[in-house]
Image: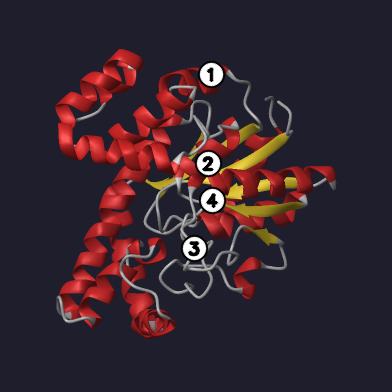
């Protein structure tokens, strides 16, 4: 474990991860490293539930409000930047507290996964893309099967982007399957102890999500999206694909009504929470704290500190 010990606070949206993270960091002398794929973007505060200065409680926060919404940020960039933050915190004798619900970001950061199965070759990609258009997905998938049969079995011939990328990787050196195998066998970058927050009753979580969306509307989510559009952002930008933003954008552009957009935000947020809950099943040995209707953060802090003080 080259990077030392870290704490992870995760779980579905609206479970109080940010609050518990600040409480734990304050108690343990730690600093927060956000693992939220949308809180990284500047000017996107309300719809991402980005913690403000008061909620941060004087605890340093990293990987929040640090990327232009015009930038197409990726998990590989996140791993690079967040790992540097964690290593700097550890060098200063403090504890990184990784807080967020973007499971892929957390898993990739802890594992130390690199995403360079092969260097990108735009010229080769364009050639393969033209070949795909001419030969068809079935023929391209058969070609991939000769070089990377494991990857080929996982792909559909209509998935042009992934088929082309897999061929590009295989032709450039290391196939995606070889890369994945090497990554799985590598020693994790960080030694993590994980706390997963949730609710005993799924409906209580959904009610909190709906209430949070209503609160975002009252806080000015529509004005926030209007401001982003005036800046020149479009629905095509990665940042505007976030739940809450794309739906409100559709309403502002007349593609739906605002009440319909709000209901869609709530529905998609609940669906996202279900996916997050499934992802959280990946953490063996994690402390799982399931709240009743109202989170008991005092109890959660006690349970977490006891868990973190225990044997690794």
First along the sequence among labels 1 and 3: 3
Q: Does any portion of residue 157 appear in the rendered image?
A: no
Name the residue: 30% across, 58% down. Answer: 269
In terms of depth relative to the viewer, which is nearer, 119 or 251?
119
Quadrant in the picture for the C terminus: top right
Sequence-first disc among 4 and 2: 4
Q: Where does the image place residue 277, in percent across and percent down from the top left?
A: 36, 42
Local crowd size for mark 1, using a 10 Å CA cut-off: few (<14), some (14–19), many (≥20): few
Question: Few, some or many C-alpha atoms within 10 Å of disc 4 (few <14, some 14-19, many ≥20)?
Answer: many
Which residue is tagged 4?
35
What mark, if any, has residue 71 been given in the picture?
Answer: 3
Q: Label 1, on which residue?
A: 182
Return the mark for residue 290: none
Q: Are marks 2 and 1 in contact (CB under 8 Å)?
A: no
- Name which quarter of the figure residue 5 lies in: top right
**Of the numbered discs in the image, which one, if any, rests on residue 106?**
2
| CA separation in Å, label 2 and label 1 | 19 Å
Mark 4 vs mark 3: which is more N-terminal?
4
10 Å neighbourhood of mark 3: few (<14), some, or many (≥20)? few
Q: Mark 2 and mark 3: span between their CA atoms?
A: 21 Å
Residue 195 rendering spot, x and y as whole percentages: 54, 40
Mark 2 falls on what kind of element? helix
* Relative image position of residue 52 (x, y in whole percent): 58, 73
Question: On the picture, is 21 further left or further right than 69?
Answer: right
Q: Nearer the viewer, mark 4 or mark 3?
A: 3
Name the secondary structure under disc 3.
loop
């Amino acid at each position: 474990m080259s990077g030392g010990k870290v704490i992870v606070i995760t779980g579905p949206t609206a479970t109080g991860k940010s609050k518990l993270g600040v409480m734990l960091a304050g108690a343990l002398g730690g600093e927060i490293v956000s693992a939220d794929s949308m809180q990284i973007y500047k000017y996107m505060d309300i719809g991402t539930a980005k913690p403000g200065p008061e909620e941060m409680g004087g605890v340093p926060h990293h990987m929040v409000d640090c990327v232009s919404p015009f930038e197409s940020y990726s998990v590989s960039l996140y791993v690079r930047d967040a790992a540097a933050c964690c290593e700097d915190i550890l060098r200063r004798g403090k504890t990184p507290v990784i807080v967020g619900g973007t499971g892929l970001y957390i898993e990739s950061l802890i594992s130390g996964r690199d995403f360079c199965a092969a260097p990108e070759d735009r010229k080769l990609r364009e050639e393969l893309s033209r070949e795909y258009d001419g030969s068809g997905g079935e023929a391209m998938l058969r070609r991939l099967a000769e070089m990377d049969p494991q990857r080929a079995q996982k792909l559909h011939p209509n998935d042009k982007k992934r088929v082309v990328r897999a061929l590009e990787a295989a032709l450039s050196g290391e196939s995606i399957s070889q890369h994945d195998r090497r990554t799985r066998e590598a020693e994790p970058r960080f030694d993590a102890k994980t706390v997963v927050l949730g609710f005993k009753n799924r409906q209580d979580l959904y009610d909190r999500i709906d209430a949070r969306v209503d609160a975002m509307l009252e806080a000015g989510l529509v004005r926030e999206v209007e401001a982003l559009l005036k800046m020149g952002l479009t629905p095509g930008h990665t940042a505007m694909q976030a739940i809450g933003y794309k739906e409100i954008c559709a309403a502002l552009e007349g593609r739906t009504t605002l009440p319909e957009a709000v209901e869609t935000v709530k529905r998609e947020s609940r669906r996202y929470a279900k996916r997050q809950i499934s992802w959280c099943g990946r953490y063996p040995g994690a402390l799982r704290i399931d709240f009743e209707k109202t989170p008991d953060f005092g109890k959660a802090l006690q349970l977490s500190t006891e868990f973190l003080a225990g044997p690794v």
